[in-house]
Image (spheres, grey):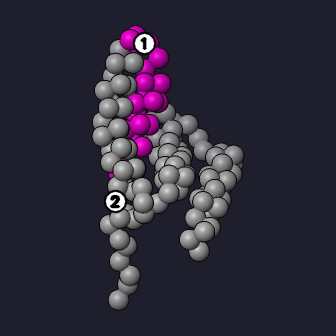
Amino acid sequence: MGRRMSPSLVTPILLLCVSNLFMTVAWYGHLKYPDAPMWKVVLVSWGIAFVEYCFAVPANRLGYGTFTAGQLKVIQEVITLLVFAGFSVVWLGETLKWNHAAAFGCLVAAVGFMFADRL
């Protein structure tokens, strides 16, 4: 029988994933609409960012203690890069290149360093 992951490990990570989906849309979704008035873009982005905070704050609150603040931050950065990579390809039509993979590799290394004391 396989080992089950503790909700204290999984819940913050899932909440950070949802948070980052909203964050990416708030920060970069408007780039597809360059003619939209800036004030509208800002208001819509703030509304989306509010929803993002509704996931990010609980993720960090629930995750702190199971993870250190530094570990939560580096987890969030890896999730951000993964979500952004998918978003930039699907929504913005951009192409991923070797440097994107290299940047991701560096962040994965950062995760390894942040969690080294748990090994």
Mark seen at residue 38: 1
Q: Position of residue 53 (x, y in %)?
A: 35, 38
Q: Could you tell me which quadrant the C terminus lies in?
A: bottom right
Q: Amino acid at mark 1?
A: Met
Mark seen at residue 80: none
The overriding secondary structure of the stretch rendered in magenta is helix
Q: Distance from label 1 to label 2 (Cα)?
A: 36 Å
- Depth check: give the residue in front, 46 or 119: 119
At x 34% / y 18%, what residue is drawn? 43
Q: Is residue 83 left or right of residue 62?
A: right
At x 50% / y 45%, what residue is drawn? 80
Q: Please determine whether, in this image, residue 25 is positioned above or below residue 118.
A: above
Q: Amino acid at mark 2?
A: Thr
Question: Magenta segment, which residues?
Answer: 15-39
Mark seen at residue 11: 2
Per the image, label 2 sits on a secondary structure element best described as: helix
Per the image, label 1 sits on a secondary structure element best described as: helix
Q: Could you tell me which quadrant the N terminus lies in?
A: bottom left
Q: Position of residue 92 (x, y in %)?
A: 49, 33
Mark 1 vs 2: CB contact within 8 A: no
At x 42% / y 24%, what residue is drawn? 30
Whether residue 79 is in magenta: the answer is: no
Whether residue 38 is in magenta: the answer is: yes
- Depth check: give the residue in front, 112 or 118: 118
At x 50% / y 52%, what residue is drawn? 69
Q: Is residue 71 left or right of residue 113?
A: left
* In front: label 1 or label 2: 2
Within-10-Å neighbours for mark 2: few <14, some 14–19, many 20+ = some
Residue 78 at least partly seen: no
> Which numbered disc flags the more N-terminal residue, 1 or 2?
2
